Image: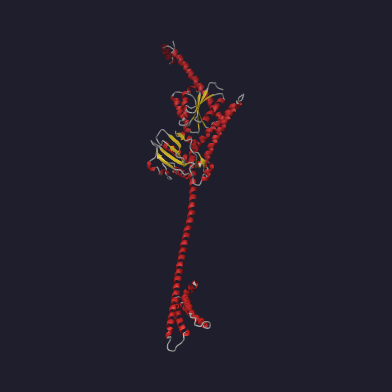
């Protein structure tokens, strides 16, 4: 029925009115045929014709069907009189018929209109829903693209950061070449002299096996010390993704101090370390954390070398800040910090040195941040500067590493 | 090899290096005393025949130690050991009277040769010192008048 209305609504007026005439003719034929079945004329088929016309063609064809039906009923199915078009006694019947036909027609066309407008509304709604759906889909596609782009950018940024950190390490090591060579030459001196001594103890008559053995033990000890230094320096050269594991920051600091000891000595700087032996373990990449400690220490060395202060002391301190955090503090007796630049010093390319790139503190901060800690600077009580950073302990939850954490504890 | 009482002092802030050098000296029959910081060393320096001194010590410079010894008029051969071939520092050390300036890592033979030479030099210095002391002692035995005559004799006059 809905399709019929739909088709009728699209037809030309000629065909719609023509169909009304056809419906009425069909009703006429049906009524003629049914005269042989029923005693009285079966004019209900005319009502059906009116209804069909209204449905099919709308209001106009409905009215046409009413008029045609009335005329047909009057002409063919009411007793004919000569005195006029309509018998007086048939008027109420005809009137009732017309009223019925009109109601049917009006009702039909009203229903058609309602259905039509409902359909229109639904179509409109569908169009709007489609529009919104495609808008949402576009937005979603854009979001997916943006997310992918963002992820790529983040990856690129991580790679750039790693490259920068590596460059910083390589440059620092470059500055430290002389010191590291000295650090390695110390155990080598022990190895060479002990080997000479050992040779002589064995050549004596009788050979002094005990002392030769002691010399060999010293050679082994010094040799492994040299190899530790070389491995430590090589680790700093290594490129690659950070390896996170449970570490003691005290070990990292001690290793760094042994690398920088000679550098400190050359600049007449004494290093005082107060490392809390009861410090809980932290999570991190030892190479990157060593880089942070090294950057802070090298900065302090530079600050103290540049200042006129004759008492050059570097204080290293670690302590437990809370159950979740350990604190590392690097304090120097250098020229100190301008309170106005306490934050700007962490920005890239900020430097007060002639040959510095100004990346050290910026890289250090991003390393500490990536470990879930904080790095900040404060002016020293009397002179100098204090750089401090925190690291979460293994006891505190680290996002994405809960399983690993459980395994290593 | 040399006189048995010759004691070599070794000052290096690295304990293993100190021990190794001491052992090497012992293996050729020399006495060695090991010091990790200059403070104890200066108190006992009179017993030393020569000194092996590291240039870069924790907190102090080997050259400063040399200067302190010179200030206290302690004259003994010093063999410097340096982590690097630093020309300005070696020049300063040699000018200030160092016996030898060796670069680490040093070969055991080079070190022992240097010690040997230093001990010979030390011995010569000791003998010279002893000779001088003897002369001074004898001079002190002269009377005031004899001293006057002596100065005239030295200037070329006859002692008649």
- Identify the image quadrant of residue A91: bottom left
- Whether residue A116 is situated above or below residue A376 in the rendered picture: below
Q: Which of A90 and B140 is in front in this view?
A: A90
Where residue B142 appears, as percent x and y from the top left, is 44, 12
A381 to A57, vertically: above or below = above
- Residue found at x 47% / y 25%: B40
- Looking at the rendering, in which quadrant would you find the N terminus of chain B? top right
Q: Can the viewer see residue B62 in this picture?
A: yes
Q: Looking at the image, what colour scheme do you see?
A: secondary structure
Residue A172 image position (x, y, % from top left): 48, 40
On the image, the x and y values in percent for residue A60 come to 44, 77
Residue occupying the far right of the picture? A206
Of A324 and A30, which appears nearest the observer?
A: A30
In the image, residue B120 above or below residue A143: above
Answer with the quarter of the image where residue A322 lies.
top left
Task: List the single residue furthest toward the top.
Answer: B160
Frontmost residue, A260 versus A41: A41
Q: For this rendering, which residue is in front, A59 or A406?
A: A59
Q: In this view, does A80 lie above or below A124?
A: below
Number of marks in the image? 0
Name the quadrant of the C terminus of chain B.
top left
Residue A266 visible somewhere in the drawing: no
Give percent across and percent down for residue A59: 44, 76
């Amino acid at each position: 029925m809905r399709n019929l209305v739909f088709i009728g609504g699209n037809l030309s007026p000629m065909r719609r009115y023509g169909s009304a005439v056809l419906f009425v003719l069909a009703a006429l034929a049906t009524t003629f045929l049914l005269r042989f079945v029923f005693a009285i004329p079966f004019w209900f088929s005319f009502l059906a014709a009116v209804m069909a016309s209204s449905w099919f063609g709308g209001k106009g064809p409905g009215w046409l069907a009413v008029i045609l039906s009335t005329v047909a009923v009057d002409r063919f199915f009411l007793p004919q009189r000569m005195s006029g078009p309509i018998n007086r006694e048939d008027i109420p019947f005809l009137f009732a018929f017309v009223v019925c036909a009109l109601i049917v027609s009006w009702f039909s066309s009203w229903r058609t209109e309602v259905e039509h407008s409902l359909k229109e509304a639904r179509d409109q709604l569908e169009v709007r829903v489609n529009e919104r759906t495609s808008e949402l889909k576009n937005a979603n596609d854009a979001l997916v693209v943006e997310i992918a782009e963002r992820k790529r950018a983040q990856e690129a940024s991580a790679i750039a950061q790693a490259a920068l950190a590596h460059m910083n390490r390589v440059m620092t090591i470059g500055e430290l070449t002389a010191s590291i060579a000295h650090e390695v030459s110390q155990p080598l001196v022990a190895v060479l002299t002990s080997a000479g001594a050992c040779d002589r103890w064995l050549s004596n008559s009788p050979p002094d096996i005990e002392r030769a053995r002691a010399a060999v033990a010293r050679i082994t000890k010094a040799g492994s010390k040299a190899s530790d230094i070389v491995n430590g320096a090589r680790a700093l050269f290594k490129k690659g993704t950070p390896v996170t594991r449970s570490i003691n920051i005290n070990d990292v600091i001690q290793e760094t101090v042994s690398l920088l000891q000679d550098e400190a000595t050359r600049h007449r700087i004494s290093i005082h370390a107060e490392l809390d032996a009861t410090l809980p373990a932290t999570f991190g990449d030892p190479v990157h954390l060593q880089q942070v400690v090294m950057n802070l220490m090298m900065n302090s060395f530079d600050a103290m070398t540049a200042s006129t202060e004759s008492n050059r002391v570097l204080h290293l301190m670690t302590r437990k800040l809370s159950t979740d955090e350990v604190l590392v503090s690097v304090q120097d007796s250098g020229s100190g910090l301008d309170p106005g630049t306490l934050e700007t010093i962490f920005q890239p390319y900020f430097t007060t040195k002639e040959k510095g790139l100004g990346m050290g503190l910026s890289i250090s901060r991003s390393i500490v941040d990536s470990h879930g800690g904080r790095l900040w600077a404060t002016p020293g009580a009397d002179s100098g500067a204090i750089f401090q950073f925190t690291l979460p302990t293994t006891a505190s939850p680290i996002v994405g590493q809960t399983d690993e954490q459980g395994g290593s504890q | 090899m040399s006189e048995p009482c010759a004691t070599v002092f070794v000052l290096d802030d690295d304990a293993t290096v100190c021990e190794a050098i001491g052992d090497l000296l012992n293996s050729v029959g020399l006495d060695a005393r090991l010091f990790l910081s200059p403070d104890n060393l200066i108190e006992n320096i009179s017993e030393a025949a020569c000194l092996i001194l590291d240039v870069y010590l924790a907190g102090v410079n080997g050259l400063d130690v040399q200067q302190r010894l010179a200030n206290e008029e302690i004259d003994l051969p010093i063999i410097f050991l340096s982590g690097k071939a630093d020309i300005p520092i070696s020049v300063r050390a040699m000018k200030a009277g160092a016996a030898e300036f060796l670069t680490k890592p040093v070969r055991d033979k080079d070190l022992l040769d240097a010690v040997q030479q230093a001990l010979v030099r030390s011995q010569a210095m000791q003998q010279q010192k002893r000779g001088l002391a003897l002369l001074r002692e004898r001079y002190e035995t002269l009377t005031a008048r004899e001293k006057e005559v002596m100065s005239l004799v030295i200037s070329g006059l006859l002692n008649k």
